[in-house]
Image: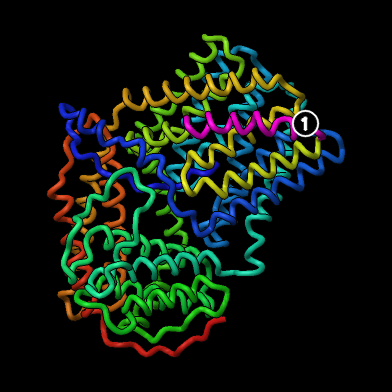
């Protein structure tokens, strides 16, 4: 059910006249390869089961399983926000619940006012496009817009009367409120759990980066294949003093994510103070030139990562040079973000991502056209459930066309295998209503347990669950359900990907150029503070973090544009030079971070 974010690879050729080489870069084997499961796969899996079980069993007790589609809309909100600290998760999941209810309300009102299939498909396609843009702009994370589209599209084609809508929305909001409690319940046991995991990932990425500079630790510097769509663009060979762009970029992204998580986590606690010190050490290992020694040694970083990820106390590392200054800067930055002006700046940034010049606009147009084409084609051929085709098309659209192609393969294979699983389990689900409820809960857990390994594997569990939901309203002929699902999947995937190829995204290269300019400005600011002996240590730390953030954004923009077709050639040489210069500037900040600050040690809880 969730969309696990995957870093796109780079096609070997990107210019329009050389399309055959780009097509050869779309390797099915790479798209279908299994990866290691996420380290937190069980959190959304358990959350959605708990959030769904209580409403399901309650409706079973009152013999109203026909209403389960409305409670499920709220229960599925428990899938969101598991990577966020609890202070931000509370706001994010509340927003998800309200957004789910708003989309459902539009669908229910439309379904009650008209029975025109053409109007219903148009509204479904428009909702899918809006939901895609909002989820991408707010960066809510997996499972993204697909759950919203699944709920709103299904509701469009369900019989509805205006007088029923308030009660149905109340069921959704009630189940959503319970899902909100489920999503926040782990805070009672482990208040800093998300921050600990983010810092552990930063330490592990820094250890890999540090190990790449150590010829005695080559195995750790090459951790094996990841779930990627193409070969890594970085060089295959590098000397011991250069960890290579792949490791540097991964470490920069992990350290930046850790700082962002800590900044959003609320007031400092002793545990968070220790976590901040650990990120300082991870940053030292990432930016420092030369062989890794002392606290920046890979083995030390890995040991800290294991302790941080575990349930014991957070390790309290020795203070690195500039630690007190950096923690003071983090406190000041946190205060700015929480102030009124900081909140206004965040709202302005969100509006820019939604504005007329947004790079998300081409993806929204793709979603709108692809979902509409899929729905109308399905209706024209006489299939009874065009919303399946709409959801299939909507699920394909990723950051670029290369990832959309991979998702097309994954979705099609997963759905086709999923209908076979449905055919096998259908007799069991019809034993009793309780058996049907248990089957749905099982597949909900299985989907989240499998989807982080690859989207197609999770779809094998999502498909039978979606088909079993129809059984709550009454039994349907198995052959009809299977046939419609197969045809809707094929039509939705074909028309969805066709729309992705026809709607160009020439803004992707423009986003790279904007990211390059931002990186150049951030690097110049960092170099000025490094060269200025009178610059405050907190200012040096702030400019360094700003440079790290700009490099992360630059790599994301480059990866997105690299997977797009029909666009201007990328400024490859400038992008590579900007990354190298940025990493050199980061390395130059390491010995100039100020005198060693021996702040009072704060023990871990």
The one of 457 and 597 positioned closer to us in this rendering: 457
Q: Which residue sits at x=20%, y=51%?
A: 517
Q: Quadrant of residue 285?
A: bottom left
* Horizontal and vertical percent position of residue 290: 19, 76
Magenta: predominant secondary structure element?
helix
Seen in the picture, residue 545 relative to 392 is either above or below; the reply is below
Seen in the picture, residue 98 relative to 215 is either above or below; the reply is above
The one of 356 and 484 positioned closer to us in this rendering: 484
Does any portion of residue 409 appear in the rendered image? yes
In this rendering, would 435 be left or right of 591? Answer: right
In this rendering, would 125 be left or right of 501? Answer: right
Does any portion of residue 263 appear in the rendered image? no
Q: Quadrant of residue 591?
A: bottom left
In this rendering, would 544 be left or right of 478? Answer: left
* Horizontal and vertical percent position of residue 316: 46, 83
* Horizontal and vertical percent position of residue 263: 45, 66
Q: How is the image coloured?
A: rainbow
Q: Residue under circle 1? A: 430
* Horizontal and vertical percent position of residue 531: 15, 75
């Amino acid at each position: 059910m969730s969309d696990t974010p995957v870093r796109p690879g780079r096609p070997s050729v990107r210019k329009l006249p050389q399309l055959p080489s780009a097509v050869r870069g779309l390797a099915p084997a790479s798209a279908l390869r299994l990866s290691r499961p996420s380290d937190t796969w069980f959190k959304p899996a358990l959350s959605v089961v708990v959030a769904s079980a209580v409403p399901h069993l309650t409706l079973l007790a009152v013999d109203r399983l026909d209403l389960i589609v409305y409670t499920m809309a709220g229960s599925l909100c428990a899938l969101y926000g598991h990577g966020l600290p609890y202070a931000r998760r509370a706001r994010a999941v509340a927003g998800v619940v309200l957004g789910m209810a708003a989309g459902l309300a539009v669908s229910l009102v439309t379904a009650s006012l008209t029975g025109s299939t053409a109007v219903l498909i148009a509204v479904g396609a428009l909702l899918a496009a809006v939901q895609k843009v909002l989820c991408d702009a707010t960066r809510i994370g997996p499972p993204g817009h697909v759950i919203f589209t699944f709920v709103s599209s299904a509701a469009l084609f369900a019989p509805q009367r205006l007088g029923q809508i308030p009660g149905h929305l109340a069921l959704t909001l009630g189940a959503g409120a319970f899902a909100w409690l489920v999503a926040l319940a782990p805070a009672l046991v482990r208040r800093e759990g998300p921050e600990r995991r983010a810092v552990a990932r930063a330490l592990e990425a820094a250890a890999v980066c540090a190990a790449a500079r150590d010829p005695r630790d080559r195995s750790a510097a090459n951790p094996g294949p990841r779930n990627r769509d193409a070969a890594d663009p970085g060089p295959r060979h590098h000397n011991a003093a250069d960890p290579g762009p792949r490791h540097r970029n991964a470490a920069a992204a992990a350290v930046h994510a850790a700082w962002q998580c800590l900044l959003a986590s609320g007031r400092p606690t002793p545990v968070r103070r220790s976590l901040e010190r650990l990120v300082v050490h991870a940053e030292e290992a990432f930016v420092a030139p030369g062989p890794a020694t002392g606290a920046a040694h890979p083995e030390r970083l890995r040991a800290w990562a294991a302790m941080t990820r575990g349930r014991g106390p957070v390790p309290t590392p020795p203070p690195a040079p500039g630690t007190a200054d950096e923690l003071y800067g983090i406190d000041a930055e946190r205060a700015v973000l929480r102030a009124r002006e900081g909140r206004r700046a965040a709202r302005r940034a969100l509006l820019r991502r939604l504005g007329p010049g947004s790079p998300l606009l081409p993806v929204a147009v793709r979603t709108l056209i692809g979902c509409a084409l899929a729905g109308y084609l399905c209706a024209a051929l006489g299939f009874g459930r065009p919303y399946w085709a709409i959801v299939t098309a909507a699920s394909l659209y990723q950051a670029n066309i290369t990832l959309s192609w991979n998702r097309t393969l994954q979705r099609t294979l997963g759905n086709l295998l999923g209908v076979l699983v449905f055919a096998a389990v259908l007799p069991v689900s019809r034993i009793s209503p309780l058996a049907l409820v248990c089957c749905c809960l099982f597949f909900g857990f299985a989907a989240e347990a499998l989807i982080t390994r690859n989207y197609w594997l999770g779809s094998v569990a999502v498909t039978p669950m979606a088909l079993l939901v129809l059984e709550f309203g009454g039994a349907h002929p198995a052959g009809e359900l299977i046939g419609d699902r197969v045809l809707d999947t094929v039509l939705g995937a074909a028309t969805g990907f066709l729309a992705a190829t026809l709607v160009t995204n020439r803004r992707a290269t423009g986003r790279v150029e904007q990211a390059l300019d931002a990186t150049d400005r951030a690097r110049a600011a960092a170099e000025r503070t490094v060269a200025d002996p009178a610059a405050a240590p907190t200012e040096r730390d702030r400019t360094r973090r700003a440079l790290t953030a700009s490099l992360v954004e630059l790599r994301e923009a480059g990866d997105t544009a690299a997977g797009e077709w029909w666009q201007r050639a990328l400024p490859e040489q400038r992008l590579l030079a900007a990354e190298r210069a940025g990493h050199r500037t980061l390395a130059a900040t390491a010995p100039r971070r100020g005198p060693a600050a021996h702040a009072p040690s704060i023990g871990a809880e």
